[in-house]
Every structure is written in C-alpha cells, then in structure tokens.
Amino acid sequence: MIKLLNFLSNKNLLLIITSILALLFTLVFFSNPLDRHWYDILWFGYSILVIFAVAHYIPVLASFLMDIHQSNLKDIKKQELEEQQAEAIK
C-alpha cells in the first residue's frame, strides 16, 4: 500500500509514463492513413489532454485522500479517549 501511494505521489514519474503513452497513441493515430475529419483530430487532442490531466491531478488527489485518512484516524483516537473518560466518570 505504501509503495502504491509513493508511486501515485510521484508526479514526475507519472508524467513520464503519460508522455510515453501519448507518444504511442500519437504514432498509432497517425500511422493509419485513413480519411480523417476535423472531429477525429479534435477527439485525438481531447484524449491526449485527458491523459495528461489525469497524470497531473492524481498526486493531488492521492495526497488529499491521505490527509483525510490521517484526519479520520485522529478523530477515531479522540472519540475512543472521550468514551473511556465518559465510562470512567460513570
């Protein structure tokens, strides 16, 4: 789990992998000499944009989820202490 979080937090590595995937996608798209219309090229550009956007925002999302998880763990400990104190008072 820790290795996965470290991988998802490494933005440079994700962008390198994304660049390789985008390059392969571009080679496949332009190697097929079929008749293309303007909307094909727009969809191609949109799909490349989505690939890079996902790679750009995954580290942000992963760190946000880790912060939420840590906050939940702190809240659980705090509630357990409050319950123990309430039982001790009774």
Image: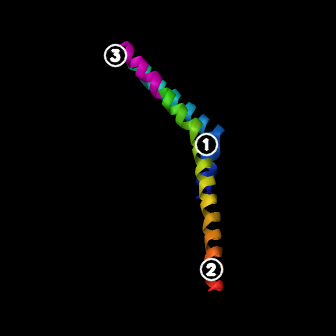
- CA separation in Å, label 2 and label 3: 74 Å
Question: Does the magenta run of residues contain 41?
Answer: yes
**Of the two numbered discs 2 and 1 in the rendering, the one whose residue sits closer to the viewer:** 2
Q: Which mark is residue 60?
A: 1
User: Is 84 above or below relative to 79?
Assistant: below
Can residue 27 be seen in the rendering of this structure?
A: no
Residue in front for this viewpoint, 3 or 25: 3
Which of the image's four quarters has the N terminus? bottom right
Residue positioned 62% across, 57% down in the render: 2
User: Is 33 above or below relative to 22?
Assistant: above
Q: Residue furthest left?
A: 35
Amino acid type shown at disc 2? Ala
Which span is picked out in magenta? Answer: 37-47
- Residue 15, given in percent of the width and then of the height, sits at 60, 35
Residue in front for this viewpoint, 39 or 22: 39
Mark 2 near mark 1, Cβ–Cβ under 8 Å? no
- Residue 73, given in percent of the width and then of the height, sits at 62, 64
The residue that mark 2 highlights is 86
- Residue 54, given in percent of the width and then of the height, sits at 53, 36
The image quarter in which residue 47 lies: top left
Amino acid type shown at disc 3? Leu
Amino acid type shown at disc 1? Val
The image quarter in which residue 11 lies: top right
Which of the image's four quarters has the C terminus? bottom right
